[in-house]
Amino acid sequence: MWVLAVILIVALMIPVAAILVDSPLGRSVARRVEGGQGTAPAPELRDLERKVAALETEIEDLTRSLAGMRDEVQFMQRLLEDPHRKKPTT
């Protein structure tokens, strides 16, 4: 019974660890480890990182906006191509 509990806990911790590693917190820890212990990045590098983060945010917003517009266009096409809709009489 004890072995089954340990196996179950380990099996449940694998997805949790994967989620934490892929989270912003995990990326931050990875950047800190990669950059070395106790070294602060140069001001130019911090400024560049801030600009890249802003650009990534803008790209994500534009991607969401584009996906919404794509859905709207598909909806309009379905409305226009619906064979059961009434044709206007003149």
Image (spheres, helix red, strand yellow):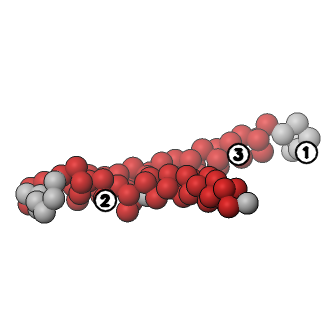
Question: Which residue shows up at 89% across the image and 44% down it?
Answer: 85
Q: Tell which of 49 and 13 is nearer to you.
A: 13
Query: Can residue 51 be seen here?
Result: no
Image point (66%, 56%), residue name: 3
Corner quadrant of residue 23:
bottom left
Q: CA distance from mark 1 to mark 2?
A: 58 Å
Kind of residue indicated by mark 3: Met
Task: Check the picture and name the quadrant holding the N terminus.
Answer: bottom right
Which residue type does callout 2 highlight?
Ser
The residue that label 2 is drawn on is 28
Residue at the far front: name it: 2
In the rendered structure, the answer to whether residue 61 lies left or right of residue 38 reads: right
SS under mark 1:
loop
N-term-proximal mark, 1 vs 3: 3
Q: Position of residue 10 (x, y in %)?
A: 58, 55
Q: Is residue 42 visible?
A: yes
Residue 4 locus on image (x, y percent)? 70, 56
82 lies left or right of 30: right
| Residue underneath mark 3 | 76
Q: Position of residue 38 (x, y in %)?
A: 13, 63
SS assignment at label 2: helix
In the image, residue 47 lies at what x, y percent? 15, 58
Q: Residue at x 43, y 54 (%)?
A: 21
Tag 1 residue: 86
